[in-house]
Amino acid sequence: MGVRVVTQELSEEDMRTLIGFNNKYGYMLFRENEFKDEEIPAGDSRDDRKTQAQRLRGVLWYVFQATGKPKSEWNNWYDTEMEKIRQHYKDKYLD
């Protein structure tokens, strides 16, 4: 999904600023009139393309590839590593 914005002519400085936002995540607000402070999002935007679990799985895949093991061993290796992570937190916080 995308949004196309057409503006009147921009100064070179404004154009450079706008181009600098290409492929970045953030907030875009538009209103004909001024915004109230409580209507402006607080904090930084997030890149929500991947969940935290997907990001962890991606890191584990990278580590697995570095081991040089065949891809056929991925599922067993992943299950073992996830159990180690679970056990680490159980030992640290639940015992």
Image (cartoon, rainbow, N blue to C red):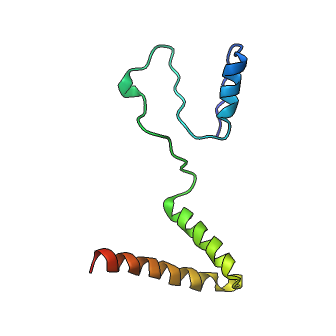
Task: Name the quarter where the N terminus is drawn.
Answer: top right
Q: How many numbered markers are drawn?
A: 0
Rendering coords of residue 5 (x, y %): 66, 25
Q: Nearer the viewer, residue 52 or 1?
A: 52
Residue appearing at x 52%, y 58% in the figure? 51
As drawn, is 88 to the left or to the right of 4?
left
Decide if residue 6 is in sight here: no
Q: Quadrant of residue 24?
A: top right
Q: Quadrant of residue 60?
A: bottom right
Q: Quadrant of the C terminus?
A: bottom left
Q: Is residue 40 above or below residue 93?
A: above
| Residue at 73%, 19% in the rendered image | 12
Residue 26 in view, yes or no:
yes
Q: Residue at x 41, y 35 (%)?
A: 42
Residue 63, horizontal then vertical, whole percent: 62, 74
Considering only vertical position in the picture, is 54 above or below 26? below
- Residue nearer the viewer, 65 or 29: 65
Query: What is the residue that sits farthest to the front in this orientation?
Result: 13
In the rendering, at what x and y percent does residue 46 appear? 51, 46
Residue 24 sits above or below residue 55 on the image: above
